[in-house]
Amino acid sequence: MDDLKWDAQGLIAAVAQDRLTGQVRMLAWMNRQALQATLESGQATFYSRSRAALWRKGETSGHVLRVHEVVADCDGDTLLLLVDPEGPSCHTGRATCFFRRIETSDTGAAAHAPDVERDAAPFLLSLEEEIRQRASSTAAKSYTRFLLDGGPQRIAGKISEEAAELSQALQAESDDRVVSEAADVLYHVLVGLRARGLDWRRVIEALAARAGQSGHAEKAARQQT
């Protein structure tokens, strides 16, 4: 802790990021006691400047941030908390506190654009959200809606088709074709997950759970269950 650069009030900024999806969930402040409490409990604990007191994220809402790792930046004046969030992280009920888009106004000044509010997220999460919206849209049918309306059987057929094309590209086609076919497979997988009501994070979670295991041993264990 002595290597960190605490400000004049003895505080340091702490950014909480979903360790699996990469989504930034919130920013808050820590003093030495808050950081120590976080490291000891494994739950994000911050310092409230308005109340001049420690507070554990989720102590009233239940939406805790389980801290997997704490990392300091190169200057030692900001912390990154890699977390497993339980529920939304914003007091508004949104997953992230970052959703108010700032755009250039008619006068050229930066301004909040309330009509384009949406959660800031890595591209795959944004794509997942777009697929989710297409699933409930009553607008003219899109290709995504066409797949979803066809159910798991139609989607499974497309995944098999795209996987075969990726396999062929890997063996005998250009790098650009490999990338394009891999993108097709991933898109159709996301649609298939949505058809089953599953989130992309669960897939990454399954991958993370296998980290450090022998691939052969992990596969054999799955075949026994």
Image: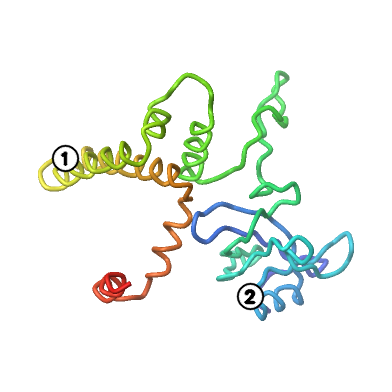
As drawn, which residue projects farthest toward the right? 51
Residue drawn at x 47%, y 50% as measured from the top left = 198
Instruction: Provide the residue designation for mark 2.
Output: 42
Distance of mark 2 from mark 1, alpha carbons?
46 Å
Residue drawn at x 50%, y 35% as measured from the top left = 130
For this view, does 31 lie left or right of residue 210?
A: right
Which amino acid type is shown beneath numbered disc 2?
Answer: Gly
For this view, does 135 lie left or right of residue 184?
A: right
Residue 71 figure quarter: bottom right
Instruction: Provide the residue designation for mark 1.
Output: 174
**113 shown above or below 23:** above
For this view, does 128 lie left or right of residue 35?
A: left
Which amino acid type is shown beneath numbered disc 1?
Answer: Ser
Residues packed near mark 2 inside 10 Å, few (<14), some (14 to 19) or many (20 plus): some
Residues packed near mark 1 inside 10 Å, few (<14), some (14 to 19) or many (20 plus): few
Residue drawn at x 66%, y 81% as measured from the top left = 40
Q: Position of residue 22 (x, y in %)?
A: 52, 54
In the picture, the quarter occupied by the N terminus is bottom right
**165 shown above or below 89:** above
In the picture, the quarter occupied by the C terminus is bottom left
